[in-house]
Each structure stands twice: as structure tokens, then as C-alpha cells.
Image: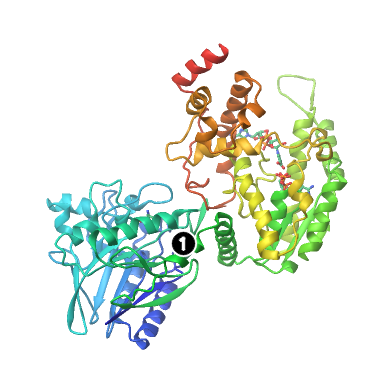
Amino acid sequence: MMKICSCQFEVEAGQPAKNLEKILSFIKEAKKNNADIIIFPEMAVPGYFIGDTWDSSSFLRDCEYCGQKIIAAADGIAIIFGNVAVDWHKRNRDGRQRKYNALFVAQNKQLLSAENSVYPFAIKTLHPNYREFDDSRYFYSTAMLATELKKDVRELIKPFTLFIKGKPLVIGCILCEDGWNDDYPISPIDILCADKKTDIIFNISASPYTLGKNHKRHRVFSRHAQMNNVPLVYVNKVGIQNNGKTIYTFDGSSTVYAADGSIADYAMPYQETARYIEFPLKKEVAQNLASDIEKDDIACIYKALTYGIGKFLQKIHMKKVVIGISGGIDSAVAAALYSRIISPENILLVNMPSVYNSSTTKDLARELAENLGCAYAVVPIQESVDYTIRQFTETKIHHASSDIPEQLKITSFTAENIQARDRSARVLAGLAAAIGAGFTCNANKAETSVGYSTLYGDQSGFLAALADLWKYQIYGLALYLNKEIYKKDVIPQAVIDIVPSAELSADQNVDEGRGDPIKYPYHDYLFRSFVERWDKATPEDILLWYENGSLEEKLGCRPGLVKEYFTDPTDFINDLEHWWNLFSGMAVAKRIQAPPILAVSRRAYGFDQREAQNTPYYTRRYREVRQHFIGK
Ligand SMILES: Nc1ncnc2c1ncn2[C@@H]1O[C@H](COP(=O)(O)OP(=O)(O)OC[C@H]2O[C@@H]([n+]3cccc(C(=O)O)c3)[C@H](O)[C@@H]2O)[C@@H](O)[C@H]1O
Ligand SMILES: Nc1ncnc2c1ncn2[C@@H]1O[C@H](COP(=O)(O)OP(=O)(O)OP(=O)(O)O)[C@@H](O)[C@H]1O
Ligand SMILES: NC(=O)CC[C@H](N)C(=O)O
């Protein structure tokens, strides 16, 4: 009988001293519970997303020091943990200290080495280099080392041997991506299990949450266990980490797979927990628990958002927030979400009417605030907007080339944005500063995709918590909050039913059913195809799918929508080009200046979707097909 403690703990990025303290206390507890082995996640000491802090030798020395302390605690227990390993005698390919994303195995206060290893640790072999991952920017991989040593990479991927109660235990140790080998030429797990001597596989991970990812995790690791007929212990971390522009939650969901691929143990998502698992594994199976938890997408999104917002507020020491509430759905969902995270008296909801706001939405804003029990204020903006417009129109601009000063004319379009800036930059930012709070950005992903927001206006804030959610997910979240969380309609049904509108001009009158130019039931899916498809769609793909009648199926939107929305190909193409120009033009500039975004999808804006400010581009094939439809 052997007892393993799988330690799914909250790693704080860039805080090795704090992480060390936690690790040591988990080890103490595990010793009390007579565990034979304790295992911690990938980069358990330094954290994973720490940016170019990896380039600092003094930081690396601290990580090494913490590693030594952990090794010294390995008496009476074997410890497996993730940390950065530095070879101070060698260089990385960027000329800096040689660094490895490494897994250490310590027993009897000493590090163990795998057979034939040049180092007393295992090195990550497969380095993810997509989305938020930057392993190859900082770390030397097993494959690079093999090239340097003129060896076959397989020779460097070897198991360790531990002695548990005097008996040898052959353990195959890998790091996160090493298990996700589908698109790589080698499979580290298969290599470790090739001679059938490996008793167990340990995967230490730093795997951020993405909607639907856990299903894939189970598929990937269950198959590895089954194919190699070996139990597999997958240990992930919890907490949040960010890369400046995008914030990721780490959901843990650490799992133990039996040799037949079934789930033998499952740690609840987002919980800091040490699970004790006895081997040989008992046959009662946690499979149902694991799949039940991921059944409902909106429930998962709710969990990720509340966890992520809560942890982010803690991280930046923010206890109060100010939210502009318009009577529309986005700000209502934001207010209802934040009210589950911080106490309503620390949330100030502000309605800021101009002449374009209907009494319908003003009343709904008040009703929402009453339902939530938050502090509430009405700060009308018409006077200051009028003042700004008057000041601009009365101000004379002197040009060196002319004696006649220029008199500005403010169009209604410019006036729209003056309102949005007045609300955010003057009122919300000012109030937030006055009460020691932050103000929120409530933009959704459809608006963020095409920059349907005002720069320095509603585009601003300390955090864009909803900016990775499509409008249909915002509606789903509103219904979920009412039904499952509050168990009453805190978000008034009318907020859900009303047409989404910026209410910045007479053209956007909600009482006349006029609102946003974004046709969410179609555009949510069109924009999603630009950003979330692995092979990103461009107007060429969209137009070809339109031509062959597969567009709705390809996008995943409701069949029949395209005919309902667009009378003919010209209409369709005009719409496509309008939004593509914004998506790949001005909206990029806005996203660069946007607040950090909380990620839930497979591709979040910020620094997950990497972008450059370039001019919108139409491919040759697109131009040909377009010409076939509507001529030049
Ligand atoms: N590359 C670049 N980098 C940085 N800034 C750049 C830029 N190119 C232009 N600019 C600047 O950006 C300005 C234009 O941007 P911006 O002021 O945002 O205005 P703009 O993008 O022209 O308009 C914003 C649109 O969003 C709508 N909106 C606003 C607010 C709320 C809502 C809602 O749904 O509630 C909707 C509004 O009705 C309008 O249709 C230009 O005047 C120029 O100063
Ligand atoms: N009259 C208003 N009072 C207070 N805040 C407002 C007002 N109008 C806009 N805002 C702020 O600007 C943000 C952007 O407005 P937007 O219209 O996109 O969102 P919404 O009104 O919440 O939802 P919807 O787009 O569905 O109407 C809002 O989330 C809100 O914070
Ligand atoms: N840390 C890693 O290697 C992460 C990559 C991996 N595919 C994931 O689970 O997200």
C-alpha cells in the first residue's frame, strides 16, 4: 500500500517565498498523514506567467534557494515539485542563463536523477508556444539539450526510481504539455513506458482554464493511461496568473487516472486542496463527478468569472468598485456578478442619463440597484456634455496658414463619444478615485471585436471581466444569475428583453426598438470565426461559405439567419467588409489600449490573441469571388 498526496494549491506568480511557505506547510501536513509521496504542480515555486522576470538572475537565485528548502524537507516523504532549474555555466539561445522548466524529485533530503541524466531533475520536453504560453522564449527543452549533447532525445527521457517502504517504484515524470503530444513528433509518456517497467506516471501542470478544456484533459490523459496500462496522476494548480493584458484562472481539476483510463480521483475545480490517494487504486470511480461538473457551460463560466474577479481584486488590493449601470444587459450582469464577490455596500452603481436615455432604462437601472442592495447614485451628464460641445464650438482654433480662425462643428457622431467619455473619464474615474475604488469596463466580446465602444470612454476601466463573453453568453449568464444564483429576478426581465442599445443618439431609442448596429445572433458567430477558430476565418472563407450555402453551419449560428438579415449578396458583402475593416483596423488600436481581460474562451483578446496594428487586408481569392457577386 502506498499513499500519494496530490497537492492542488494556489501558486502566486512571482512570489517564490510565499509559495515556499505554503509548500512546506503542505509537506508537514502530508507527513502527519503518513503520505509516502507528495506532489506539487509545474512551476510551483516561481509561478508560470511572470513575464520577463525570468531574465533576472537575482530572482532565479531566490527560486533556487526555495528549491533547496523543499529538498531539505524531504525526509520520511518523497517530494515531487516544479521549479525553474538554472545551469549557471551554460547559456540559453538568447545569451542569458540556461534555464529549464523542470521537475525535481527529492527523497532523503537529496535530489534523485533519472537514469543517465546529466542533471538531477527532469526537463520539460514539449514546449507550448501558442496562446498565452511562452516556454520557448525562456526555457531550454529536452530536445534542444539532446541536440547540444548530440544524443537522441529519447535517451534523455528516462524514469526515476524511488524507494517506498524499501521497495523500488519506477516513476515517469513529465510536465504539462509533455502529455499533450498529439501535434508533436514524440510522446514522452510512451517513451517512459516503452519498456513496461514504469509503475506510475506523474504529470505536473500549469494549465489555465478554458471553456471545455477539461473534457479534452480527460480524453488526453485517460487515453495515455489506458494505452500504456499505467496509472497517471495529473496535478494542476489553482489561482490566477496574468500576462499583463489577459488574466487566466487556473482551475486545478487535478485527476488520478487508473490504468484502464477511468477516473479514480478528482479534485474540485478552483479549490486549494491536498488529496490523499491510496495505491493500488480502489475501484470506486469519480468519473461521474468529473463529468457532471462540466455539464453546463454557463455554470462553468460563472465559476471562472467569480473566481477570477475575486482573486484579481485581492491581488490588486481593491475592495470597492464603481459600475456605470445603463439599464442595459452588460452592466446589469456586471453588477450582479460583482455583488456575489464583494459586499453590495462596497459597490457603487451609477446611472448617468443624458437626454437620450429613456425612462424605461433609467427605471430599470434603479430597480437593478434596489434588487442588489448596492449603493446607488444618479449623476446626469447632459449639462457637462452640453458644456463640452459649447466650449468646443465656441473655441477658435488658430492656424499659422490663415488669419481666419477655425470654428469647430460637432457632429452627432462626435457628440455620442463625448457622452461616453464624460461618463467614464470624468464621472466614473472621478468617483472611483474619491471613494478608493476601481471602475469596471463592461464591454462584451462582440463589441470588443469591432471596437463598438469609445476610446477613453466605456472602453476604459481597471478590468474587463466580460470581454471574453459573446453577447449570447451574457444573456445566458443573466438568466443563470437570476435562476440559479439569486433565485429571483435581480436582473429585471425587461433588461433581458429590451433591445441592446448605446442610447447615445435619437437613432438608438430603445422605446422605438432601435439599438446597436451589431446583429448579435449572427455577428457573435461571425466575429467568433475571426478570432476563435484554430484556422482563423477571413472574408475569403466567409464569402466562399456564403456562396456554397454552408455559412450558418460553419459559423454555428441559427440556420436561416443570413437570409433574414441580408436581402442580397451586396448587402451581405457590405456588412462583412464593414465589420472586417473595424475588426482588423480601429478595433485593434482600441484593444491595445483596453483594460486587462479575464479569459474564458479558447482565444481571448489581450495577450492571448496576439495582434499588430495593420491595414485591413482582403485576399486575392476574396476579391475574385466578390467581383463575381457584385462587380468592382
Ligand atoms: N490608431 C489609432 N490609435 C489610437 N487612437 C486612434 C487611432 N485611430 C484613430 N484614433 C482616435 O480614435 C478616435 C475614434 O475612436 P472613438 O472615440 O472610440 O470613436 P469611434 O470608434 O469613431 O466611435 C465609437 C462607436 O462606438 C459606439 N459606442 C460608444 C460608446 C458606447 C457604446 C455602447 O454600446 O454603449 C457604443 C458609438 O456609438 C460609436 O459608433 C478618433 O477620433 C481618433 O482620435
Ligand atoms: N446612461 C448610462 N448610465 C450609466 N452608465 C452607462 C450609461 N450608458 C452607458 N453606460 C456605461 O457604458 C457601458 C457601455 O454601454 P453599453 O450600452 O455597451 O452597455 P449596456 O448598456 O450595459 O448594455 P447594452 O449594450 O446591452 O445596452 C455600460 O456598461 C455602462 O457602464
Ligand atoms: N503548462 C503547459 O505546458 C500548458 C499547456 C497545456 N496544453 C495546457 O494544458 O494548457
Residue 124 in percent (x, y) is at 28, 58
**Residue 546 position (above or below residue 104):** above
Q: Which of 35 and 49 is in front in this view?
A: 35
**Cβ of mark 1 under 8 A from ligand 3:** no
Residue 466 in percent (x, y) is at 61, 51
Classify the position of the C terminus by image quarter: top right
Answer with the quadrant where ligand 1 appears in the image.
top right
Using the rendered image of the protein, determine whether residue 253 is visible from the camera's viewpoint.
no
Does residue 154 appear to the left or right of 248 in the view shown? Answer: left
Tell me, what colour scheme is on the image?
rainbow
Classify the position of the N terminus by image quarter: bottom left
Does residue 158 appear to the left or right of 275 in the view shown? Answer: left
Residue drawn where x is 60% and y is 48% of the image: 467
Q: What residue type is labelled 1?
A: Ser
Residue 295 in percent (x, y) is at 52, 58
The residue identified by callout 1 is 291
Does residue 248 appear to the left or right of 26 in the view shown? Answer: right
Toward the bottom, the furthest residue is 32
Q: Which of 20 and 107 is in front in this view?
A: 107
Residue drawn where x is 33% and y is 55% of the image: 177
Residue drawn where x is 23% and y is 50% of the image: 186
Residue 423 in percent (x, y) is at 76, 47
**Residue 530 position (above or below residue 304):** above
Q: Which of 488 and 446 is in front in this view?
A: 488
**Residue 601 position (above or below residue 419):** below
Toward the top, the furthest residue is 631
Quarter occupied by residue 215: bottom left
Does residue 594 appear to the left or right of 115 in the view shown? Answer: right
Toward the front, the furthest residue is 283
SS type, badge 1 = helix
